[in-house]
Amino acid sequence: MPPSPDYPRLSVTGLLLAGGRGSRLGNCDKGLHLFRGRPLAAWVYERLEPQVATVLISANRNLDEYAQFGAPVCRDQINGFAGPLAGIHAGLLQADTEFVLSVACDSPFIPPDLAERLYATLSSQAADIAIAATRETGQSPLQAQPVFALIRRHLAADLGLYLQSGQRKVRLWMERHRMALCDFPEAQAFINMNTEHELILAEKYDA
């Protein structure tokens, strides 16, 4: 299906978060870890790129390899592998669009309409941030997936202050602002690969 005419694709920068330590996967650079013969980040990039005006890659290692994806690479402004919020902060600073859509580099099955659905939720609830949320079962409460978020770029300064204070919790920072949850029934679309076991399980998933 074509995107809704109400979704402002040209106002959204996609941010592929690949700046972590990968500590539970042998301290490897997870975005470059092979999955089905290709780097994990390549699968995510392929799904993200058609949804946005442009893509940024947040990385702190192997910058030349990430540059080969054809997108600008931004490094954390906060030293010491400060987590996904530091990557989001770097993306918000470098983007020149009204919105930034963050996604994890190790979730190769993100929905092809992730951006559009998050934008619809953000707009309908007059929010500053819209977060993907899933349920374990049909009756389970919504569980936020906060690294999959559509964020207004003007929040960059506040996020910088939050990080400088030593805070690192993604959800706690987002709750400081007008935040909305977007219900995604396809919970498996947000699976990520933190361990070799999870990589093996994901091989069986078809999306």
Image: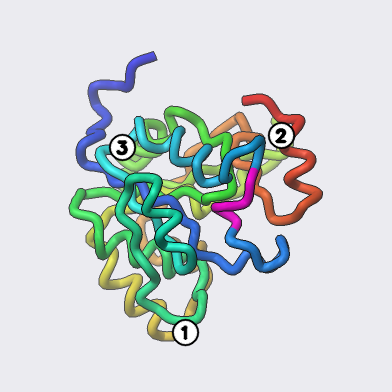
- Sequence-first tag of 3 and 1: 3
- Sequence-first tag of 3 and 2: 3
The image's colour scheme reads: rainbow
Task: Kindly identify the amino acid type of the residue bearing the numbered disc 3.
Answer: Val
Residue at the (43%, 54%) spot, across then down: 66
- Sequence-first tag of 2 and 1: 2
By secondary structure, the bulk of the magenta-drawn segment is best described as helix
Alpha carbons under labels 2 and 1: distance apart: 37 Å
Q: Which residue is mark 3?
A: 52
Label 1 packing within 10 angstroms: few (<14), some (14-19), many (20+) = few
* Magenta stretch, residue numbers: 30-34
Discs 3/1, front: 3
Vertical position of residue 49 compared to residue 21: above or below: above
Q: Which residue is mark 1?
A: 166
Q: Does the segment drawn in magenta span residue 32? A: yes
Q: Position of residue 82 (x, y in %)?
A: 50, 75
Q: Which mark is residue 139?
A: 2
Residue at the (49%, 58%) spot, across then down: 18
